[in-house]
Image: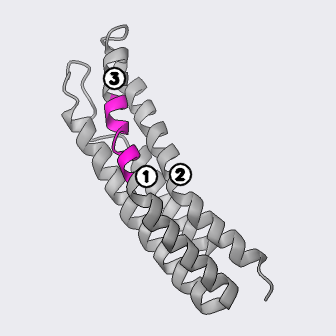
Amino acid sequence: MSAELQRVRATLTQAITTPPQPPTDARDTEFAPHHQRHLDQQRRMEMSVDALRDHLRQTLAATSPRLAQLAALGATLDQMFGGREQKLLAGVPASLKTRLEQLRQPHPDTWPPLFEHDVQQALLAELDLRLQPVIGMIEAANSAPH
């Protein structure tokens, strides 16, 4: 299970940290391409992490009754809080748009790499957030008596 987590994390981290092609031109003042890239990364994370989470739940459910309860609790919590999490994460691009505007003013010629770094950091933080339930399930499975 840990190997799957590491594979998903590495794949998503690689996608997040790969700069856009073509690189952003400092004269480009539109936020739309950055917004679309951010949304694409969020969708990729959601699909990959959800698939991993579902697979882990199935594995836990087949392992023991206690882990099956944990898997069921995890599914219930996802239903309860998943929509709220998505709504909050959907607001991140608005903050990034504000950040883009803040960087362009004092750095009119050099803002693209600064902004790209901020976008990557926001996406990596989101990835960590999305992986927390997966990490918890793996830790529970590893500490459960066999």
Q: Nearer the viewer, residue 123 or 92?
A: 92
Mark 1 and mark 2 residues within 8 Å of each other at the beta carbon = yes
Task: Classify 1 as above or below 14.
Answer: below
Numbered disc 3: secondary structure: helix
Q: Say which label, 2 or 3, has the lower sequence index.
A: 3
Image point (38%, 57%), residue name: 83
Task: Identify the residue position indicated by label 3 in the image.
Answer: 98
Please tell me in which quadrant of the rendered image residue 142 appears: bottom right
* Bounds of the magenta segment: 85-96
Question: Which residue lies at the image location 57% right of the left edge and 74% below the top edge?
Answer: 73
Residue 55 position in % (x across, y down): 49, 80
95 vs 6, left or right, is left
- Residue on which disc 2 sits: 129
Q: Is residue 97 magenta?
A: no
Residue 56 spot, x, y in % from top left: 55, 78
Per the image, the residue denoted by label 1 is 85
Residue 104 in the image, given as x and y percentages of width and height = 32, 15
Q: Residues within 10 Å of mark 1 (few under 14, many from 20)?
A: few
